[in-house]
Every structure is written in structure tokens, then in C-alpha cells.
Amino acid sequence: MTTAPTAPSPAPDLPARILIVEDDPGMRTLIQRALQGDGFRVRSVASGDEMWDALAVGPVDLFVMDVMLPKTSGVELCRAIRNGQGTNHPGEAPLAQTPIIMVSARGEERDRVLGLEIGADDYVAKPFGQRELLARVRAVLRRGQGAAPTEVSRKETILFAGWKLDLRRRELTDPSGAVVDISGAEHDLLTSFLDNPQRVIARDRLLELSRTRLGDVSDRSIDVLVSRLRRKLGADADALIRTVRGLGYIFVAEVERV
């Protein structure tokens, strides 16, 4: 993983920087015009090689990535990003944490689940309308910025079983002090559990708690996200998140806000 020598952090009030990865020229132009028309700063590329080159030049806040790409698929690129490949820029969040919206001509649930399994934050099926695309982009970016504080979540750091979640920095640290990269969807699911510790959360209730954060989700999508989160929690996963057969899930650890 390489690090660029210089890359100034953008002012917080500047529009989000979006990188489109789409090999179809017509679709690429359509998406770019829609996003630019809504005020976003947009770059677009046609392949994985061009994507890595673009990331070396400057950081991005969101990917809109086609699944079917030449040479290296969007699925492989998403997995590589989540595994830490690519350029990190000083003053910016790690590239591995950058939100990814996958775009595909196939809208079946198994394709959506595959996208979630590899670390995507949302999934848009072609054909889609401009309003739907913009709504999903805004929703994913809002998740990255974090929700407004509530009475239960005013304190910015949550401790549990030796782990630490920094809500302001959206950073998860394991008991050894190592930072664990988590996607926006994984962060928001973990926050839902930490807001409701030591109580069974029915699957439909978890859907309700997470829907505003995770967008259009289903029962199976929640199961996939829980599985992803468990993998990030490693050996502690089974002791932290337990499945309650026929009911849902329970986060069993004590939670402290500091």
C-alpha cells in the first residue's frame, strides 16, 4: 500500500468527491452528469487500472462502481479496496473505509448479497432513475458523516470487552490497540447493537433500527452484514454477538460510554 507525498484535506463544506468506475461511455456520462448536476465533484474512469491511477492523484469520498468491468471486475476492485490496497492520502480517512455503491444490470437478491459480502455499502440495479441514484448517494454520504447526536449517543467513545469505538472518527480499535477497518454499513450496524446492549433485538427491529442507516435492506442482507461484522470482531465475535434462534440477535457485552 502506497502513500502519496502530499494531498491537502478538503474544507468540510466542499461538495463530496465521487469517483465513477464504469466502462460503458453512455452510462458513465449519464451518471457523471446527474452527480455534477447535484453539485458533487466528480471524476470518472473506465477500468480498474484507471481507478488506481486516479486514486494516486487525489482522494475520493465515495465510489460508484459497476460490477461488470473489463479485466478486473467491480467485485474484485471492491474486495481489494476493503483489503487495504491503494493510495492513502495524509489528512484523509483510510481508503479502505471509503463508501462504495455497486451498480449492476442484475438486480436479484443474490447479487445484492454478494455486494454486501465483499464490503459494498449499497447496491443499485440498472436501469435506475436519476432521483434514485442521487438519493442513495446522499444516504451513503450521510452515513459516512455520522448521524446527529441523540441522548443515548452524545458521548463520542464507546468501550466494550476491551474494544473501543470512536464515533467522531468512526474508528474501531481492538483490545491490542490495533485499528480495525470497517465500512460505513458495518459501523452503523455495530452502533445499532451498542445502542441496545444485552437485549434481544428481533430481526425486524434490527431492520427498523438500521434502515435509515443502511438503506434498502432485507432479512438476508442483515444476516450478511452481521456476518461481516463478526469477521471484523475476530475471535471475540461469538462472545459479543449471539444469534437467538427464531428471534434475532443479542449484543451480550457490557457497554460503557466515555
Image (cartoon, grey):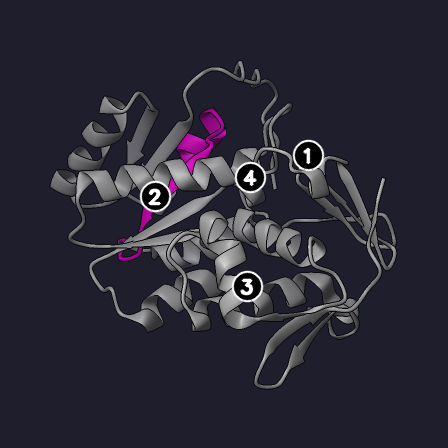
| Mark 2 element type | helix
Q: Residues within 10 Å of mark 1 (few under 14, many from 20)?
A: few
Task: Return the residue at label 4.
Answer: 95
The earlier-in-sequence mark between 3 and 4 is 4
The earlier-in-sequence mark between 4 and 1 is 4
Would residue 244 be counted in the magenta stretch?
no
- List x then y, in percent, for residue 89: 59, 27
Discs 3, 4 touching: Cβ within 8 Å: no
Q: Residues within 10 Å of mark 2 (few under 14, many from 20)?
A: some
Q: Residues within 10 Å of mark 4 (few under 14, many from 20)?
A: many
Q: Is residue 16 left or right of residue 206?
A: left
Task: Return the residue at label 3.
Answer: 206
Task: Return the residue at label 1.
Answer: 169
Which mark's residue is nearer the viewer, 3 or 4? 3
Q: Alpha-carbon distance for marks 2 and 4?
A: 20 Å
Q: Which residues are magenta?
A: 51-69
Q: Residue at x 69, y 58 (%)?
A: 196
The quarter of the picture where the N terminus appears is: top right
